[in-house]
Amino acid sequence: MSGSNEISRRDFIKVTTGIVGGLIGVAIGLPSISYLIDPALREGGKDAWISIGKFEDMQIGMPYPFSFTRVQVNGWERTSSSFGGYAIRKSDDSKDLLILNSRCTHLACTVNWHAESDAFLCPCHDAKFSKEGQVLDGPPPRPLDVYDEFRLSEDGHIEIFFKAG
Amino acid sequence: MWKKVYEWLDERLGLNDIYTNLLDRAEPKGNWWNTLGSASMFLFVMQGLTGIFLTIYYTPSPDHAYDSIQYIMEGVAYGWLIRGIHHWGATLMVIVVFIHLLRVFVTASFKFPRELTWLIGIGLFLATLGMGFTGYLLPWNQRAYWATTVGTQIAGSVPFIGEFILKALRGGPELSALTLQRFFSAHIWMLPAALAGLIGVHLYLIIKHGESHFPTRED
């Protein structure tokens, strides 16, 4: 093949097979990768405003318990997760609320309001939080989480903004 | 640089020998009917790859089998493509393997010294049919359910040991979760392992004996 532009029949077949094979590989390979990593590219569940109870039912200074469930669809299966917390009304102003998440910041057990000790107690490792959510005793590394985005709906319900994930 | 790397590898792996024996071996005069074996193997590899990918989302339980396939078809990116290739590739593979078998029969290529190649080929054909039969149940829809009911019932009509065969296939007297699970196991482990092993011997024999030439008037 010295000095000539012609390629032999053999080489032509080799090159053609290589190109066609490569094209098929790309046409199927790229969608396959997309198929594999698809779940990683998805957004989590949807954010939502969730009603936790009527504002007028909450007594000033008394932690008002609430709970709600979120359903997450994973592929062909639905998983529901429960969430809860306490709303503490401080005055007549609906913005003057402290809404605590009852998930213990230590290892995620659920804390309960204990009126006699005037504190939230965690049944798992004896953690103790004040009415404001501050750590009074036990192993938690930080105060209780706070739902700081909330609003009063037109029909008098307090709604919190729930961020998925 | 690359040449040196290649030469180092070739000295130890015998890459050139493999190439010569696999891809550069002497062939009788070219004929498209002789390509059906390669086509069958290509389909086998294709079914293997798409099948492995399907197991990422498929789940072989009566509660979820149907839903998981719905999810593959509608929820996952290119799931329809992967399953489509597997679905149509299955039909195509049965057809191609069967025509390959017919070609070998018609050209009398099964004669000495290739009797074993032929017998193993029959085994490969039966295993391919087994793949089709077991794979058909996995979508767990009405068609799959009743096709398997009928198929296992036919196997159960064998005299004397029919009932045993039926129970062994179904994992009990009725079609159940056990049936789905064992069909799945056969479909992704037992039959593919048998196919891969038999294909290995089949290929070895073909390379050893070379391909048969087409019979002429003198034959």
Image (spheres, coloured by chain):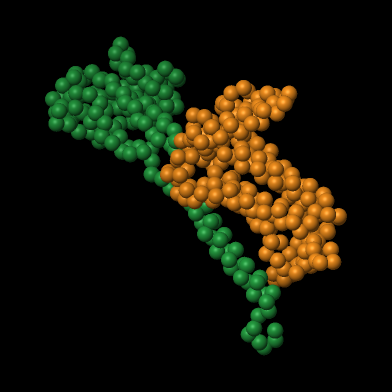
Q: Residue at x 25, y 20 (%)?
A: A64
Q: Residue at x 42, y 27 (%)?
A: A108
Residue B138, placed above or below residue A7: above
| In this picture, residue B51 sits left or right of residue B67 | right
Q: Report the front residue among A40 and B162.
A: B162
Q: Report the front residue among A148 and B91.
A: B91
Residue furthest to the bottom:
A3
Give percent across and percent down for residue A59. 19, 18
Give percent across and percent down for residue B21. 79, 63
Question: Chain A colour?
Answer: green
Q: Report the front residue among A131 and B149.
A: B149
Residue A54, placed above or below residue B54: above
Q: Report the front residue among B73 and A107.
A: B73
Residue furthest to the top:
A116
Q: Quadrant of the N terminus of chain A?
A: bottom right
Give percent across and percent down for residue A52. 25, 26
Give percent across and percent down for residue A116. 30, 11
| In this picture, residue A13 sits left or right of residue B160 | left
Question: Chain B colour?
Answer: orange
Residue furthest to the front:
B217
Residue A153, placed above or below residue B86: above
Tell how many labels: 0
Residue A151: quadrant of the picture: top left
Residue B214: quadrant of the picture: bottom right
Query: Is residue A141 in sight in this rendering?
Result: no
Q: Residue at x 59, y 68 (%)?
A: A19
Q: Residue at x 61, y 42 (%)?
A: B132
Q: Quadrant of the C terminus of chain A?
A: top left
